[in-house]
Each structure stands twice: as structure tokens, then as C-alpha cells.
Image: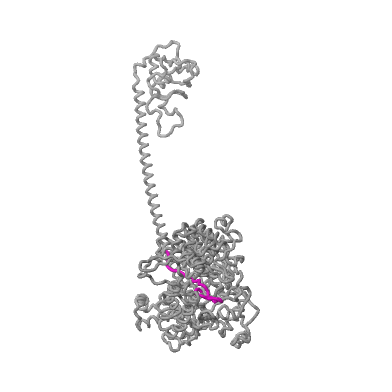
Amino acid sequence: MLQQINGQDTHSLPCSSDPLREDLQIFLENEIQLAELDDLIKVNPVTPATVLRCLQERYQVDVFYTNAGCTLVALNPFKPVSYLYRPELMRDYHVAPQLQKLKPHIFTVGEQTYRNVKSQLEPVNQSIIVSGESGAGKTWTSRCLMKFYATVTNSSTSEESHERVERIEKRVLDSNPVMEAFGNACTLRNSNSSRFGKYIQLQLNRTLQMTGASVQTYLLEKTRVAYQAPLERNFHIFYQITKGASSSERLEWHLPEGAAFRWLPNAERTLEEDCFEVTRDAMLHLGIDHSTQNNIFKVLSGLLHLGNIHFADSEDESQVCQPQEDAKCFVMTTASLLRISKEELLETLRVRTITAGKQQQVFRKPCSRAECETRRDCLAKVTYARLFDWLVSVINGSICAEPSTWDTFIGLLDVYGFECFPNNNLEQLCINYANEKLQQHFVAHYLRAQQEEYAAEGLKWSFISYQDNQSCLDLIEGSPVSICSLINEECRLNRMSSAVQLQTRIENALSGNVSLSRDKLSKSPNFVIAHYAGPVQYQIEGMVEKNKDPVPPELIQLLQNCQDSLLQKLFPSQEKEPSDLSGQSRAPVVTVVSKFKSSLEQLMQVLHSTTPHYIRCIKPNSQGQAQKFQANEVLSQLKACGIVETVHISAAGFPIRLSFQSFLERYDLLRKPRPAQPSPSSRLSRSSPTKEHSGQQPTPEKEARLQSLIRDILQTLPLTTRPATALGDHTEARPAPSPIHCGRTKIFMTTSVLELLEHQRMQTLNKCARCIQFCWRRHQRRKLEKQRWAATLLQAATRSWLTRKRIQRLHTAATSIKRAWRKWRAKMDSLVSIELDDVEENHFARVPCHPLSTTAPWPPRETIQLWPLGLVLASAPVGVIRMRRNLSLQACLQIPCHSSSYKVEATQCDQAGITSIRALPQGSIRFHCKKSPLLYANTSPETPHCDVTGFNQILLDRHRLIPV
């Protein structure tokens, strides 16, 4: 983790050198706990000494963040303080109802920008400008802010899109280690100094979810590849590959253990930023596969070997310079890693091609030793610069979302801090120029524009003096003559540049500017610029050549003809070469300063279109030691960035400014409706936005109506927050006592009043939402009851109809059964009658019987065989009982005696003979016989429980039972 914010020293302010000692003594005699003052506007009196003492006391108790009105002051602790950046703490700041009641933190600024986007207050897009000197903790602050936004945007994500949002946030966060590895380096003042500027746009959709991001870079310090100042290092990525490569990768990249490289100084130092695996994992997650990574690291290794190529002086100007003996192996290794021909590499570095004349004749001239090494450095710088730009494009392609998927953005600006080294050249001039532009943006937005607006709106305001750096900017970029224009003009002149001549031109053209001077004691040509953070002396020697940034066309052709796939992407063959341009149609020279100035102007346009938020990073000491507070070091930074003036203006001013129309559009719902005449105001509030946006000025009548509506809204606030004077009375205005003031066209208020209005607005919206929910639930309940009652009626009607249909079917079935039963009974009765009545009378002739017999004689056997069984039984001898009767009956029917199929038991009957063929059998009868052959004899409406039932089943037809 990068070390951040704090350090203290037991030394207090020096008594003899402090001109404000009396104010400090009065301030200390008030017995205020300075460590508890979380906002510098509470310091009284506000002087550099009192502000410095308050920061020192907070630093001693490990409190590193302090509000300074509209800005946040962050002290670098130079030690791990991970408890300040836990995800739980991020969520606490995100869900806090009132941010002003929490302790100052960078999360407060991040959450405020997030809520501003959510509230849609114009301008909706937000920007956080992290400024400070090199080593003050800007990179760490930007990294923590990105983690904060990734955490809070993911907390409100639904489960369906949670995985997608997490993947986007992971890529956005992974862009940090890649950019820092290839763009940061260890300098004298910072172990992780950004050697380029970047502006990151975090893209948010309508639901405030992070859909992507984009990165825009500014002025990479590519000269660091080939030149490193004493005690400084090259870019982190070179140390990562030399320390983190595996044994097989060392063989492939030709990086043996303990190898010495000229462009890799101070390699024995081990920094936290030298972690190779973190960079590789981040590149893999961004879509850079292992083979592409291997190509990148081979190219970087080739650049390290290229730096070890040295040339010896040639004996004659017509002879080319030969590489030194110990450099020949590096030539072969470089050619092998870059996949170019060794001969072509040496030819390009040692021979210069010149095109001259109208016929474009080509001449080849051997280069001197210095020119060979310059061309070698140029080859390394252009390769690394193209590689860095390609990485940025890959990162943007991986994390950037489609324009249709996002609506707003929050920008994070992390640029190189103000620099002042023993030797300062074009790089430091551009870096400090960018810091001057950002300081001017702060001055114009907070210090100058606010005070001018207070006066224009009729507030009684005493202007507070502040340090304006406009003269310094006029010196650097002014028109028609400035330092940048003179340097660019030297590049366009067709002559050898002279540092002494350029110094003379600068002094003659810009001597009237108070910010320009010269160190007369220095022998080398120079000029001194009085920046807002202090004077810096710049060396003119070599500045024009760096501004030209010439790239010989032979180097581009060499890299275009290589066999490496990555270099072919970086240097496409269809790229137009400078040599292809004729002398008549030659394009103007695009210098480093002009390109940087153009990109910086684009950045300022973006910043002006957003709502800016400033975080001022302060470096407690120049040694980077924890628990060490150097008062003079901190005081110079406070004066440079205008913290004291900012506190003065913030204490007496209003950071929130809204036009009448914007105020009504957002807070009109707080106004209590007037039942008597509500129509004119409401019509005005609905119709006025279109006119205002169209550029028409409101009439006095409309202004009076607007002020009447605003007065009604302000009456809902507590008495302590109401404006001190009535609307329209601008002569008696006192902005300081009241936290809200109404000007001619705008309303000015403090952050506390804005939070109170937002709180009341949220309560009103919640009340309306609850009312809507109640009405909707009541409607849904009534609708459900009606649906239930209708369903009950439908069910009752359906059941009634089904019951009626079932009963009808049952009645129909019962009727059919009755009808069939009656028909069957009638048919059975008729069959029985027919069977009994069809017996022939002649079969009943009497048969002679024995004279001694007392019973009637039996009919003939032929006749009996034709009788039904009932008739046979009725005619059985009545005088014979029991066994004899059975035997007689069997004899009559000719049934064998041993058969037991039919058994007949009869009792003695007084009646002799047969009185009627319909007469019932006498006594109890039991039969075991076959089924009746009669049709329907065995059919009944119900299922029978036995096979022999009823009278009809004891009747037999006239067929014989036993075949004769």
C-alpha cells in the first residue's frame, strides 16, 4: 500500500521568524482543542500561522484530512494507514444522511460528487482535481477514490447486473497498476511519481451504476527511458521484469541474474512498486493475453540492451563509427529481441539519410559518435512512447462503454505535481505550466469569480486579496509573444539553435513581465519563472531540440520492417513518413509544447463544463519520513495553493449558488399551497423554464412572481436559516450572519442549508410516495375484494348449474332403469304365463295304478319327461314320504340313484293329486340345478348375491334335463 498522510515533529513554529506571532498567541489563549477543528473556517483569526498550527496539532494525533472551506487539505502520512480506507468506512460515508457531520475525508468529496450527480444539479458532471507537489500523495488519493466509487456503485446494484458491474469495476481498478508500472518512476521527491498526467472519466448510467471508464493521458516523460537524473530510477516496469522474471523467461528475454544495464540505475533499491505479478495479472484481466505480454516484455528487454550499445569515435568523418567491443554482443541481442536485422540496426544508427534538391536526391552521411547515441536514444524513446500509447488504447478498449449506455461522468484528474530540480528543462516547464493552469482554474472559479458574482448580485461584499497567477500564465502561453511561442519559433527556423540567442530573445521580448528573471551568476543560459509555488530556474540548453522531438525516418522504416507482431502494430507500414512530404507541401512542425498546450486546453474545457472539487495534497517534509512535520515546508505549500485566501472566502461566502428557476424547479414542492389562488404561480413555474433556456430575460412581473414563490419556500425553513433581509432589498444585505441570501437572479446558501433543503425535500417526497402507496394499496385491496366477490358468485352459479345437471342425469337414469325394470318384469310374467299355459292337456291322461296303492297313479313316463319340474313335483305321490318319496321321484324322472345332482326334500301333504298346474309346491323345497335357459331369467336391476333366486328360476323349460 502506498504510504499516505501524516507525520509530525516536536518543533513548533519559530518565534523569531513568524511575523504573525501575536495572532497565534491570541489564538492559542482561547484554549480551543485545535485537533477537534475539522474545518479551518472555524479558526479565528484566519492567518497562515493559525492555519499551520491547527494542521500541525491534527497531524500529531494522526488526523490527516481537514476541510478548508470548499477544498480538502490532505497531509501525507508516509506510513500505512489502511484503517482509513476500509470498505466498511466507504459504505458508512455512502449511507450517511448528512456528510458535514462526519469527519473530513476524501470519501466525503467522493460522496458529495456522487450525490450531486444523483440530484441532477447543473452542471451534472463532476470533476475532482487532485493537486499538490510531487510526493504529496496525489496518486494514492486518486487510487482510493476509484476504489470508493467502485464500492458505492456496486452497493446499489441488483443481483442480475451485479456480476457485470463487478467485472467492469475490476477492469477499471486494474488499469491503475498497469498505468503506474509503465508511467510512474522513482524521483528525488517521490518513490512513485507520475511521469505523465491522466484524466479518468468514470461513466455512470441512469441508475448511477458504473458502466465503464476512459483514460486520457498527457505528456509522458519519455526522455526518462534514455536518461535518468542522479539518484533517480527508470520506469517501474523495467525493474519489475528484471526482478520478477522466472528462470525460463530470463533465458528468453536475455536477462541473466546480476546483469548491469546503463538505463537501469539504482536497481539495488527495492520498492513496493516492483511487484511484477500484480502488473501481469492486471494486464491479463484487461485482455492482454500471455503471448502479447511476452512480446511486450521482450521489447522492453530489447530497449535495455539497446542502452548498452556504445560507439567509438571514427578516424575520419567519412567513416562510420564502430560499436565498442563490449557492445557488439548487445547489438546482436537487441536485434534478436526486436526481431530486426543486425546490419540494418547498425546501418540505421550510424548512417543518416539526407534528401535535398528539387529532384529529391538522397545522400547518405555517416554520423558522429554523439549523433549515433542520439539516434539510439531516439529509437528507444519513440518505441516506448508508442508502446505506452498502445497500452492506453487497449485499456480504453477494455473499460470504455458505449456512449448510449452512460449519461453522466465523474472525472479524476491526477497530474504531475509542481517540480523544481537542480537542472530543469522542457519537461519541468510543461509540468509546471500544467500546474499553473490548474491553479488559475481554482483562482478563477473560487477566488475571483465568486467575489465578482457576489458584487453583481447585490451582496455587500468586501473583496479579499489573493495571489493571482495570471501574469505567470501570460509569460508562458500569452499572445502574441510568450516563452512557448519563442521556443516554437526557434524550432521552425531553418538554422542551428543557439541557447544564448534564445535567452536574448526571451529577455528582450518579455522583460516587462514581473514573473520573468534570470540568474546572472549562472554561466549557462537560463531564465527564471516566478511560479505560484515558487521560482524555478530553467536551463535553455537542449530545450529547442527536445521541443522539436525529431524522429529520423530511417528509424521508423527500421521498426516497420521488423518481424515482431507487436512492433508491427505500433509502427504500421501504411504510416506516412516525414520524408514523403515534398518541400513545397511541407506541413508545419508539430512541437512538443504545441501538442501539450492543445491537450491542456481540451482538458480545461472539460473542467469548465463540470462542477469542480479540489483536494490539496500537502507534503509534511521533503524527506518522506513519517511523524515528521516541517513547518516551513508546509507553510510554503499553503501559501502557494492559496489555502488561507480560500478559507477567508469560504467563511464569508456561499459555496452553493442556484438561479431562481433552478431553485423553484427543485424545491417548489416544499411550498405550502395557497388554496385561494394557486393558478398564476403554478403556471409561471411550468412555463418559465423554456423561456429561460431560450435566452429571454424574465420581465419584472415574472421576477416578482418568482420572488414570491421563493419567499413561500424559504418560510418553511427554520428561523435560524432564513435570509436576513427580504427579497428584493439589496442595500441592507449582510451575507455573513445569514446562511442564505437572495440576490437579483440567484440564491446563495451554505452547504448546511442545502442539506436541510435536501432533507426536507426527501421527507416531502417520502410523504408523497407513502400517500401514493396508500392510495394504490387501497385501490388494489378494493379491486381484489371485487374480484373475490365476483369469483364467489361465479363459483356459486357454476356449482348450482353442475348440481342441477347431475340431478337431471340421475333422474333420467332412474327413469330409464325403472322403465327397463318394468318392461323386464312384464316380459318375465308373460313368459311364465306362456310356458305354463302351453302344456297340452292330453299329456295328463291317467295311468292305471296298483289296486292296493293309496296314491293317485303317475302319468306315463313319456308324458312326465315333457313336464316342467314344478308340475312333476306337484304330481309326486303324496302317500310316500322321505326317502321313499325321493326314490319315487327319481324313478319318475329316470334319475340314477347314485347321482346327487338333484336332491328333493318334501313333507307330507294332506292333499292328494294335482288340483291345479298353478298350485304352489307343498312343503319346503331345496334345489341344486342348472341355470334356467329362459331368456332374461337371471337378469335383475341390481347385482345378484347368488345364482338361484326367485320363483322363475325354479321353472324349467319343456326340454329334457337328461338326454334319453
Q: Is residue 530 magenta?
A: no
Look at the image and tell me in which quarter the N terminus lies.
bottom right
Q: Looking at the image, is 82 positioned above or below residue 745?
A: above
Q: Quadrant of residue 863?
A: top left
Look at the image and tell me in which quarter the C terminus lies.
top left
Q: Is residue 637 left or right of residue 788?
A: right
Q: Looking at the image, is 425 positioned above or below residue 871?
A: below
Q: Nearer the viewer, residue 320 or 422?
A: 320
Q: How is the image coloured?
A: one colour
Residue 931 appears at what percent x and percent y?
A: 42, 25
Q: Looking at the image, is 587 positioned above or below residue 833?
A: below
Q: Which residues are magenta?
A: 405-427
Image mark count = 0
Residue projecting furthest to the front: 316
Residue projecting furthest to the right: 10
Residue 630 in view in this figure: yes
Residue 682 appears at what percent x and percent y?
A: 37, 76
Q: Quadrant of residue 21?
A: bottom right
Residue 344 appears at what percent x and percent y?
A: 47, 60
Q: Looking at the image, is 882 positioned above or below residue 439?
A: above
Residue 795 appears at what percent x and percent y?
A: 40, 52
Residue projecting furthest to the top: 851
Q: Nearer the viewer, residue 30 or 214?
A: 214
Q: Nearer the viewer, residue 418 or 716?
A: 418
Q: Is residue 189 left or right of residue 566?
A: right
Residue 121 in view in this figure: no
Q: Nearer the viewer, residue 13 or 498?
A: 498
Q: Is residue 417 magenta?
A: yes
